[in-house]
Image (cartoon, grey):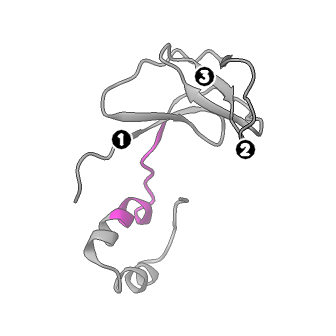
Amino acid sequence: MGVLYLSKLLIYHFVVDRPVKYIYRLLPVINGETMAEVVANTGVSKDAGYLYYLGKDGNVWRTKMARGGKKTGGGPEMVATAGVTRADGFLYYIDKGGNVARSPMARGRR
């Protein structure tokens, strides 16, 4: 979800018909804040057909995705050395720019 930059008048008209629970989910986006922060700049270029993830060792790995019952072939391969140490309560992933990012995990329901 991208960051929305709207005037206060447009925000009012956009959220006035929504339930309160939905409005609270939009607040970080409306205020121009992002929930994610970049932890390590790796700049990995992503190839189609591969799943990129942060391994237990703190480095960026990739593995071939299974498609239509075909075998993936080969094992995981290390793509970049990031040296990230994980903290509790965060979800770590590789963002669009190929960097390691983290977001706070959703805990409980509102």
Secondary structure beneath label 3: strand
Please tell me whether residue 29 is drawn above or below residue 36 in the rendered image.
Answer: below
Residue depicted at x 35% and y 86%: 17
- Badge 3 is on which residue? 60
Q: Position of residue 106 (x, y in %)?
A: 32, 47
The answer to whether residue 48 is above or below residue 74 is below
Point out residue 96 in the picture as x, y percentages from the top left corner: 64, 43
Residue 83 against residue 7 in the figure, above or below: above
Residue sitting nearer the eye, 5 or 82: 82
The residue that mark 1 highlights is 104
Task: Tell me which corner region of the image, top left, top right, bottom left or bottom right, holds residue 27.
Answer: bottom left
Left or right placement of residue 33 versus residue 74 in this view: left
Q: CA distance from mark 2 to mark 1?
A: 33 Å
Q: Could you tell me the amino acid type at mark 2? A: Gly
Looking at the picture, tell me which residue is in the foreground, 67 or 21: 67
Q: Which circle's residue, 1 or 3, is located before the other in the chain?
A: 3
Percent x, y of residue 42 = 64, 25
Residue at left 42%, top 66%? 30
Q: Amino acid at mark 3?
A: Val
Callout 2: 10 Å neighbours few (<14), some, many (20+)? few
Q: Is residue 83 left or right of residue 85?
A: right
